[in-house]
Image: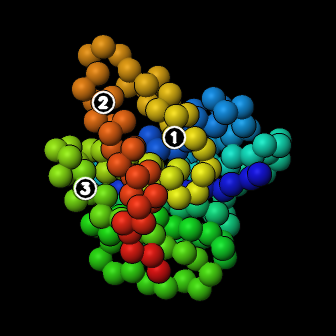
């Protein structure tokens, strides 16, 4: 088993946190994992991508370059570059609250989810990335949801962040649940 992933968004959307949580959960499940990141030149608000390779075997090449199996585009500005980086047979999860127009790429499945709107309905826009992470895990089976909960707890589990941990776990489960109920548009 080997997955190449690209978690992309604009500064502050939590794409790097998604990649970090995937790494932590992979380690919990005793899988091999490597993460690299890219950032735009802007001081704040620029596009960024966390690239993650997960495998049951040693990872000899940690580069994700136009061959991502799983991708996430949280913002409109990073949508097309992320789509371009998907391999044939891959799946791109798109924040349809932010992406202005969805374009087709033959051989790439796109799952459109209004995660920013859903996060607003939950009362915290900052959990949009975690709703999307739940959808990714729920749709692909890349990792167990419980492993992501363990990673969230390790990251946000301090006493003074209990409310933040609780809403993030709710967001994760909401995303996973959506994929089980197929409450999404797919192209």
Is residue 97 visible in the rendered image? The answer is yes
55 up-or-down from 73: above or below: above
Residue for badge 3:
118
Viewed as shown, does residue 176 lie left or right of 30? left
Q: Position of residue 45 (x, y in %)?
A: 31, 52
Q: Is residue 169 above or below residue 128?
A: above
What residue appears at the point 41 percent right and 61 percent down from the top-left corner? 181
Q: Is 12 situated above or below 114?
A: above
Mark 2 closeness class: few <14, some 14–19, many ≥20 residues within 10 Å: some
Q: Nearer the viewer, residue 95 or 62?
A: 95
Whichever of callouts 3 and 2 sits on the residue coming sooner in the sequence is 3
Q: Which is nearer the eye, 31 or 179?
A: 179
State the SS at label 2.
helix
Residue visible at 39% across and 58% down in the picture: 178
The residue located at (45%, 76%) in the rendering is: 186
Residue located at (38% from left, 69% from top): 184
Cα–Cα span, label 1 and label 2: 15 Å
Helix, strand or loop at label 3? It is helix
């Amino acid at each position: 088993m080997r997955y190449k992933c690209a978690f992309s968004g604009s500064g502050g959307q939590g794409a790097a946190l998604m990649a970090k949580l995937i790494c932590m959960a992979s380690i919990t499940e005793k899988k091999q994992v490597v993460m690299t990141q890219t950032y735009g030149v802007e001081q704040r608000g620029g596009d960024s991508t966390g690239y993650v390779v997960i495998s049951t075997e040693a990872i000899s090449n940690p580069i994700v370059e136009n061959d991502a199996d799983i991708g996430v585009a949280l913002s409109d500005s990073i949508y097309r570059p992320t789509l371009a980086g998907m391999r044939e047979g891959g799946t791109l999860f798109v924040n349809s609250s932010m992406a202005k127009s969805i374009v087709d790429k033959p051989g790439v499945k796109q799952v459109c989810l209004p995660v920013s709107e859903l996060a607003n309905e939950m009362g915290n826009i900052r959990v949009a990335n975690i709703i999307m992470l739940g959808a990714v895990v729920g749709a692909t089976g890349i990792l167990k949801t419980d492993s992501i909960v363990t990673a969230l707890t390790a990251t946000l589990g301090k006493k003074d962040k209990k409310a933040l941990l609780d809403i993030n776990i709710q967001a994760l489960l909401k995303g996973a649940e959506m994929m089980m109920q197929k409450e999404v548009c797919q192209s």
